[in-house]
Amino acid sequence: MEMNESLWDNAEQEFQEQKSASTNEFAEVILATFIYSRKKLREGIKKLSILGDYKLEKDGLVNESDFIKYDPTFGICFRIAEDKRPYEVKEKERKERNQKKNFKIIKGIVENDNEVFLNLYEYEFPKIVRLVIKNSGTVDNARDVFQDGLVIIIENLLQKKLEITESFDGYLYSVCRNLWYRQWIENKRKLKFFDDYGYDDLDIDYRDYEEHLDKYEQYAAAIEMLGETCRKLLELCYYQNMGWNEIASQLGYASAGSARNQKYKCLERIRKYQAEITDN
């Protein structure tokens, strides 16, 4: 079957609008690449979390009671000269600093940067453990919530549905709190929900495609058959939501048009590989 770019364009639009892909073979392939990239991100975060556990164990933070007591807040206060500039100027600079810092954190997690993740894990994970344990949970529950919270924030940032101008730790804590609170409510708890840190709740979007995971698992083998460049191209396009000029520059294509044409070829290869696997 020859590649029909208009069909792929329609499938992409359907995917972006978050409609059901069950009746569109091309949209199924696109959705499969998204789920595949999400799984790879989760696997990367889990591997980094293992390193984080080793670090916390080395620091003597291993038992649930240790997590409850642990508070990494620094009690040092420095006197600084009063900044008399207008509030709007100071606020703009503060938000720009936060955005740069947050971008470094997100980039580090997506690229499996040990140093970036371990720093986040050491100071923010114990807060989530404290929250979960004080509300009928365990360290393992906290670990799942922490990892899910990271995935949610990363995906919202990549899909341009969220702009973090405040501290990353506050957003992460709020998302994790919401996730655990939902589970807590589902268990019909009638106790008070304890929250020592009290960050504001966030209305944050999460495209839950996990219900389709079994159906699209068949595509995983086909995606694995692609070369690394093809897999990376599709990840940058559909999961990291990069523009074509940026993708072309990062992967070494001559132009944005060349990268886009290669994307169609990669998607078509997935469809053909999947059909061959099914037939066999």
Image (cartoon, grey):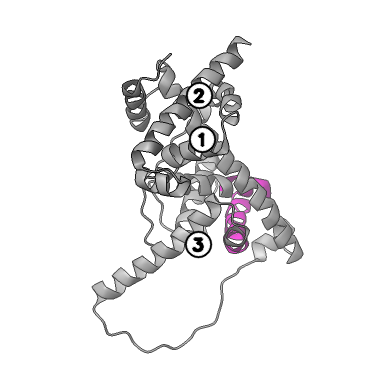
Mark 3: which amino acid?
A: Tyr
Q: Where is mark 3, residue-wise?
A: 197
What is the C-alpha distance between the residues marked 1 and 3? 43 Å
Residue lying at the far front of the rendered structure: 254
Magenta residues, dominant SS class:
helix
In magenta, the rendered stretch is 118-145
User: Residue visible at 34% across and 37% down?
Assistant: 257
Q: x%, y% of residue 2? A: 40, 16
- Amino acid type, residue under disc 1 in the picture: Cys
Query: Toward which corner of the image does residue 200 lie, by quadrant?
Result: bottom left
Residue 76 locus on image (x, y percent): 54, 82
For the residues bearing labels 1 and 2, Cβ distance under 8 angstroms: yes
**Element under disc 3:** loop
Marks 1 and 2 sit apart, C-alpha to C-alpha, by 10 Å
Q: Position of residue 36 (x, y in %)?
A: 54, 33
Identify the mark nearer the N-term, 3 or 2: 3
Badge 2 is on which residue?
269
- Please state which of residues 32 and 155 is positioned toward the viewer in this rendering: 32
Query: Which of 140 and 188 lies nearest the eye of the viewer?
Result: 140
| Marks 1 and 3, the one that precedes in the sequence | 3
Disc number placed over residue 230 in the picture, else none:
1
From the viewer's perspective, is the residue at label 3 or at label 2 nearer? 2
